[in-house]
Amino acid sequence: MDGLFSTVLRMSLTAGLVILAVLAARAVLRLAGAPRKYAYVLWAVVLFRLLCPLAPEGPVSPLPAPEAAAALVEGWADDYVGTTATFFDNTPEFQAAVEAGLPVQSGGYVVTASDGVSPPATAGEVLFPWLAAAWLAGAAVLLLRGAISHRRLRRRLVGAVRLEGNVYQADHISTPFVMGLFKPRIYLPSGLGEGERGYILRHERTHIKRLDHLWKLLAFLALALHWFNPLVWVAFTLAGRDMEASCDEAVLRRTAGDIRAEYAQSILRLAAGRPSSATPLAFGAGDAKDRIRTVLRWKKPARWLAALGAAAAALVIAALAVNPASGDPMGRSYRTAEMLYADQRYSFSYTEETAPQYSVTGTGELLSRAPSEDEWTYLGEFTEISWSRERRYALFDALTCRAQEAMDQVARMWRLDTFDQNGTLYLLMETRRGAALLGVGYDRPEGESIRWLFRLRADGEPAEVPAGAGEWTASGSFAYVLQPGEQAVSERPVVLTEEAPDFCYQTTWSLGSMAVQVGLAAEDGTEYLPEFAGGSARGVFRNLPPGSYRVVVRSSTRNLRYAETTTVPLEVTGAIAFTARDA
């Protein structure tokens, strides 16, 4: 249920923006004197957004990307509630928290509840279940109220007399209305004059022709689903007014002679005792004052005004019914538009003019070159990742306001590791507004960091990848849980040849103070197993003797900070690739 509630929240956030846009467009149409039916048709896009979790992409849309609403809801769910404690890896509390199974955050710290060993509570765990239950209860109450009102109304129709076709007369109702889904009927109260009955029937038949009885039912279901959103109540009320007023205009347009005074009098007389919003379309429904004003001021619109209203409504619906085209930053070349962050620990830095140019292929391969160079250098291929806001913050030595604002806007992220001596790391980011950011930094034993953060500006088509660049002949990944002193050996061999003598590896493990060996073991027993600490390791073995090898990951019994031995098991994950590069 929590997942469904989160989906409804995302839909409601997007629909709220659509409602605000429709309110603005509706005000312009009314100010211009356009026929009311064009204001009414605008609400169709609101109904679509309230009921459909997916929408097509379009070239033009004033709405933010759907990831924006998702990121906002996820941000609420990830917020800690209650008292928390933070411990860094040079404290005994850190060791105790890790041994209790808490994950180590990027930056070498853990976040716990107040007791120091339990996971911190989040809004998604504590509040969302209660909010979801309240949402479901509210929707159920609204639907039940509608069902009861509908049943009571049906009881008042007992004994209704058929006048003609689908038209019936009932003695216990005070206003005409349409009832029924697939075979709608028109019910009239007793005592209507012949002339009054004629235009009232035209009004109700217009409802049936436009399928308003179905649209109103869907609108009520949307209201029940999003009852917590005040903008949805506003939309439901105004859509009902526009529906009735547009029907009134249709009757006036199709009736010979001027019946405005009589028609307005009927609206006023039949406005009392109308059914609830959940029940069928009633002639007396809507805002009587608004309808009477519309009727008395009505005049046949000029053709150009009707055409302009139709075009404006179609344009608004087309723009609001689609999501903006994916801001996927792949498939473009870039220049630096703005330097958002530069780590002050380093003496050298770029400017917007001297920063490298970058190119990202459609398949996510990154190339770079200096502004004065013509040749592109291949750097590697991006992999999409999902990082929390706190982990993004931890990338910065001193989180500036501009860097924090940029990280708050991130909707999607991709990572590229170059496996060079510096552990150079590239992080490509797409913001909720469709902007592209590139973080350049390092992944070292003490943690990941960003040295520069650029906001990129598109600058043409992507560069071509040099032939053979970055092509590894084979790759793989592994995930082990190792007891102290235990090792894991890959089942599949790694075969290196004279033409392909390089082996690339990247490894992370759960407890940074533990030592881990990772590398290769040849069939003759020769081992290439450097030892690492700090929670991560990366590197490249170059020009190894040709032959068959096995990947070996070995956990030490040594805790480098707290004791000579440990009993804590390690979760070790990694990726490997092997072949020669055409660098």
Image (spheres, rainbow, N blue to C red):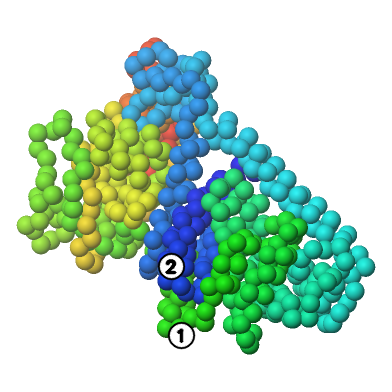
Figure quadrant of residue 434:
bottom left
| In this view, 328 is above or below 131 | below
- State the residue at coordinates (68%, 47%): 139
Q: Residues within 10 Å of mark 2 (few under 14, many from 20)?
A: few
Q: Is residue 385 toward the left or the right of residue 246 in the image?
A: left
Figure quadrant of residue 198:
bottom right
Q: Where in the figure is residue 509, as x and y percent of width and height? A: 40, 31
Q: Is residue 488 toward the left or the right of residue 148 in the image?
A: left
Q: Helix or strand or loop: what does disc 1 sit on?
A: helix
Q: Are the residues tagged 1 and 2 within 8 Å (C-beta)? A: no
- State the residue at coordinates (39%, 49%): 411
Numbered label attached to residue 31: 2
In which quadrant of the rendered image does the N terminus lie?
top right
Kind of residue at badge 1: Arg
Query: Which residue is more in the foreground, 340 or 213?
Result: 213
Numbered label attached to residue 346: none
Kind of residue at badge 2: Leu
Evaluate whether residue 470 shows in this view: no
Residue to which mark 1 is pinned: 303
Q: Residues within 10 Å of mark 1 (few under 14, many from 20)?
A: few
Query: Which residue is more in the foreground, 155 or 446?
Result: 155
Q: Where in the figure is residue 195, as x and y percent of width and height? A: 74, 81
Query: Which residue is more in the foreground, 238 or 537?
Result: 238
- State the residue at coordinates (50%, 50%): 13
